[in-house]
Image: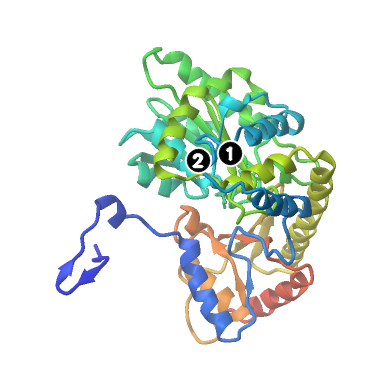
Amino acid sequence: MEPTFVSGNRILRVSEMAENLIPSEIIKLGGEIREKIAAGEQIYNFTIGDFNPAIFPIPEELKSAIIEAYQNNETNYPAANGQLELRQSVSRFLHTRGGLEYSEDQLLVAGGSRPLIYAVYRTLVDPEDKVIYPVPSWNNNHYCHLSGAKGIPITARAEDNFMPTAASIAPHVSGATLIALCSPLNPTGTAFSRTQLEAICRLVLDENRKRKETDKPLYLLFDQVYWTLTHDDNLHFDPVSLFPEMKDYTLYIDGLSKAFAATGVRVGWAFGPRKVMDKMKAILGHVGAWAPRAEQMAVAQFLQQDAALDRFLEDFTKKLHERLHGFYQGFTQLKSEGFAVDAIAPQGGIYLTVKFELIGKTTPDGKKLTTALDVTQFLLNTAHLAIVPFSAFGASRNNPWFRISVGTAKIEDIEQVLLNVKQALSQLQ
Ligand SMILES: Cc1ncc(COP(=O)(O)O)c(C=O)c1O
């Protein structure tokens, strides 16, 4: 283990948990990209699951509501479970847009969705409890580490659009505490079909029927932060809409960040059984992970403006769609020209899954590409394209699939990037 801090001769030891925590792989990659950009290189940086506000600004109505909230001096502590106005607004939003019935006391607000995911883990999981999650997926490995869980990664397959199947989860449900799912999924941009999600819900219900009333049930964390951003005729499915009995076991994670390009506004919400929400509230209260009060009041107001929401979401999803499909078609074309690439049709969210089967190939300067990280470096250095390998989402070091995030992509970038990729690939032996 590397000593983290050294003061004189003293190694400042920290907890085992902190010592062994792996920092975000994506943030690490970001440092190198920033260095290249600072050195004047034109880099197409599609690594971060974020938006360039010059391309994707937050809704005007939201921005003015935030300013107004500060002018109204909404600057003291917010309510521990979130401002009532916001919880009422979210409850209405879930009802009108998602057909879900959750009252304000089944809702918990925090400073983005992340603290809520952490709180779900801390509330449900005891050390060594089994948590099942698909690979690739976003950050479940880290939340398992933070909570001391025994992570059970399930490798999802390209032929299933990288969504986990009930058949792959089934062997692990006995004795498990939590299944962590996300749809539309980060990093793949794919989503559950009705039948896929139904089969997983049946597993959860069957397993819970087998457990005694005094046992901890098998819970489902359902992260749907991209649910308003589905494309084409892909519908969003969620556990409780499919099976009302799932309500006792499902913890939804949701929020403003991705749905309204508002990652820096920091407002997220979770909903589920009241007892679990109350415990999560107690944990987050000690952490102090509340969303700023002014932002909460603003979001409460904004979510009631149905026409503004429609206008924003229509334009936003159209722009995302143009970019995702632009890249998708470009990669499909390159594949048909014989290049070692592939892509999976995007279904929702802000990501596209692309394949670069380059391991084993040699660069013009004689370097053999042996890992996904080598391929990442090659694309960065030669095509000036920065993307994230699935190995950063828990997949193996030589997994050939990558995530392209389009939240920072200009429409005119697409052609240039595809040209750069084609030229780069043509140089490989
Ligand atoms: C699936 C998923 N859930 C949650 C989050 C975190 O969202 P927030 O910015 O609201 O904390 C992200 C961010 O990338 C995500 O991809």
Among the 4 quarters of the image, the one containing residue 151 = top left
Kind of residue at badge 2: Leu
Pick the front one: 115 or 138: 115
x, y percent for residue 334:
73, 68
Kind of residue at badge 1: Trp
Quick one: label 1 or label 2, which is nearer the N terminus?
2
Mark 1 neighbour density, 10 Å: few (under 14) some (14–19) many (20 or more)? many
Q: Residue at x 25, y 52 (%)?
A: 15
> Label 1: which residue?
269
Q: Is residue 296 visible?
A: yes
Q: Quadrant of the C terminus?
A: bottom right
| 426 relative position to 376: left or right | right
x, y percent for residue 121:
42, 37
| 252 relative position to 419: left or right | left
Among the 4 quarters of the image, the one containing residue 240 = top right
x, y percent for residue 164:
55, 39
Q: Residue at x 46, y 62 (%)?
A: 25
Q: Residue at x 78, y 62 (%)?
A: 326
> Label 2: which residue?
116
Q: Are marks 1 and 2 in contact (CB under 8 Å)?
A: yes
Disc 2 within 8 angstroms of ligand 1 (CB): yes
Mark 2 neighbour density, 10 Å: few (under 14) some (14–19) many (20 or more)? many
x, y percent for residue 251:
53, 31
